[in-house]
Amino acid sequence: MPHEKFHYKTWAEVQATASALGCALPVAEDTSILGQPLDAGNVHFANRLGIAPMEGADSTPDGRPSEYTVRRYVREAEGGSAMIWFEAISIVEEGRSSATQLFLNRENLDSYKQLVAQVKEAGLKANGYAPYLVMQANHSGRYSNPGNKPAPMIAYRHPELEQYRAADDSCIVSDDYLLSLEEKFGEAASLAKEAGFDAVDIKSCHGYLLAELTSAYNRPGLYGGRYENRTRLLRNGILAAKVYEDASFAVTSRLGIYDGYAWPYGFGVSEGSGLEPDLTEPIRLVREMYEDLGLRFVDLTMGNPYATTHVTRPYDMGKYVPDEHPLLGIHRMIRGIGAVKQAVPEMVIWASAPTYLRQFADLYTAGAVESGLCDGMLFGRMAFADPTFANEILHDGRIDPRHVCLTCGKCGDLIRAHKPTGCVVRDPQTFIPFYREFLEEKKNQPANFRG
């Protein structure tokens, strides 16, 4: 079927296209199940709707939240989601994705305390409950860009990814450096707890350092080769964070279960499987997270936003036309996540990437929960466009189609330009000035420039 832009007026039209493509998407008759509370051990979520990590590129140079950061999270808290999974917050200066990425440290801890308090107060005042706040602890690895100058720190040489970000053998991080990061994740958990976050996420997805290690089949030493080595930093980072866990503070992970590259350059595939997902190792990892490491909930995702963008967030508008129809990406995402949920039913699973479906994302999400493919859903781009999407669903029964994300990609342009990031279409007064700056700077860049 030829690629086409989103044109569906009814869910029946979505289903007809999906059927012609040979895939089926879950759907519910109504969204009432999304208002049901959810418990994961001693963690309580007020409903089944959450906000996915979306970087805002709006920190101060020393890593503190700016007025734009505070504005974004306060608006999201007022919007009614049970959980806000904060954007990637760097654990070390050299691992920042840009000079405008948040970076929590002892020197700026008080600013994070203030941010968390404001966000919780906003949710409590607007909805009668404060959103559950997860701090995402991250090392950008291959995409490290401190000072807005590429300084990749890679697990291994990856010929396809190096088309997007140049790297050589000197960029490969040592085992000693990786060992030092285990302690850094523990420190990040301690700081997150002091700041007032409810949980810390030891992030392993979307091509960043921990995720890249999971596919380091050809790396020698303690952090490459066999499964136990490739997952060593993730597991040990979780254990370092667990030292600070108690009844009011949890440890979790946002885990990429499929990268979109054939073996030996991607996780969630096997030798000879090509691009077809093989979830044997991801299922093993999630089971170990639950049974051995004591995690009670995780968020699952796929892809690499820098390279296999359509796997991470299916779209029909962007820098290139995807090789596949976006509905195939939606299908791959939820069926993969569902396979993990069904294999480890005790684990509370939050799913990802419903935004492409626009005004039908709520029925799709309710259908995924009803079908047992996940326990709840995190919305990313939709939260930029419509931070009140949760209350629309919870109080009106459906998301307002006048507010939905159009998956135009302009928010992605802003973050890559290191500018405060949000929805240019739905919040033009705030973000059009930054988008105009981006367009002007782009016009003045050399033709061979790579951001």
Image: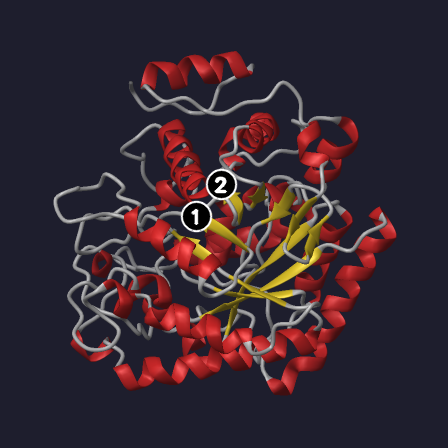
Query: Does residue 242 lie above or below 175 as drawn?
Result: above
Task: Report the side of 146 relative to 427 (left or right).
Answer: left
Query: Does residue 226 lie above or below 409 as drawn?
Result: below
Q: What residue type is labelled 1?
A: Thr
Label 1 belongs to which residue? 301
Mark 1 or mark 2: which is in front?
1
CB atoms at circles 1 and 2 under 8 Å apart?
yes
Position of residue 108 measured from the top left corner of the image (x, y, whole percent): 65, 82
The N terminus sits in image quarter: top left
| Residue closer to the observer: 433 or 372 | 372
Identify the residue shown where x is 47% and y is 74%.
Answer: 239
The C terminus sits in image quarter: bottom left
Identify the residue shown where x is 27% and y is 33%.
Answer: 323
Q: How is the image coloured?
A: secondary structure
Identify the residue shown where x is 21% and y is 57%.
Answer: 163
Position of residue 256 measured from the top left corner of the image (x, y, whole percent): 39, 53
